Every structure is written in structure tokens, then in C-alpha cells.
Amino acid sequence: MVTLSRFWSAAVVSASLFVGVSPAEAQAPGLYYSWRSINTDTVGCIDRATTALNTQELENIQVEGNSISGTTENATAVFVCLEDADTTTVMIMVSSVDDENAFALRESLKGAF
């Protein structure tokens, strides 16, 4: 099965070279993250993250434990809230098929948080 998979991979690459099409012409995907300490508990952190995701019009917002995520047409954003004895650390990660879009969305969410 592995050799058949390799065969098809080689065939696709060879065919794309034959027709003059590079298999990697698309823009590189982007993944950006950021974190900071805040003076609230996990519930307060999730509330603020929910507001940020709604403000930036993300959809399919889902909360799972100490994290919350949302999506746009071509990006996914996740906030993770890590509570410690003194403070809570919030981490935001944004991935997108478009590097510039990922960076811009992360900056917008940071501002909205």
C-alpha cells in the first residue's frame, strides 16, 4: 500500500512538471500566536475571548474546558486560558491559509480582547 501511495505521489509530481505547473505555487499558510498575563480567572478570560471572537465576526464559536475557538472563511482562532495561583495567562493562536490574514486576525483579536 505504501509503494502504491509513493507511486501516485511520484506520478502527480512528474505530471505537474511535465505540464509546467509547479506543485507549490500557493502562498504559505500562516500560524501566529501571542500570550499575556491577565488579572482574572478562567471564566473571565473565556468571557473576554468570547467577546473578542464575536467582535471580529468569527463563527462556529465553541468552548471546550479552558479554551474557546472560532472560524472565518479561511482562518481558525483559539484562545487558551491557563489559570495559576496569582494570574491567568491567555494564549491566542491563529492559523490561516493566508499568512497576511492570519497575522491581521491575530492583531485584531488581541486588540479586541
Image (cartoon, rainbow, N blue to C red):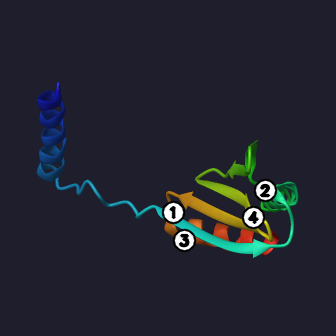
Residue neighbourhood size for the residue with mark 4, other residues' Cα within 10 Å, grouped as few (<14), some (14–19), many (≥20): few
**Tag 1, which secondary structure?**
loop
Could you give the CA–CA distance between mark 4 and mark 3, rounded to whole angstroms? 33 Å
* Residue 100: image tag: 3
Q: How many marks?
A: 4
Q: Is residue 73 above or below residue 40?
A: above
**Tag 3, which secondary structure?**
helix
Which numbered disc, 4 or 3, marks the residue that appears first in the sequence? 4
Residue under numbered circle 2: 57
Identified by mark 2, the residue type is Glu
User: Label 4 near label 2: C-beta < 8 Å?
Assistant: no
User: Label 1 near label 3: C-beta < 8 Å?
Assistant: yes
Residue under numbered circle 1: 98
Residue under numbered circle 4: 84
User: Label 4 near label 1: C-beta < 8 Å?
Assistant: no
In the picture provided, is 27 more to the left or to the right than 113?
left
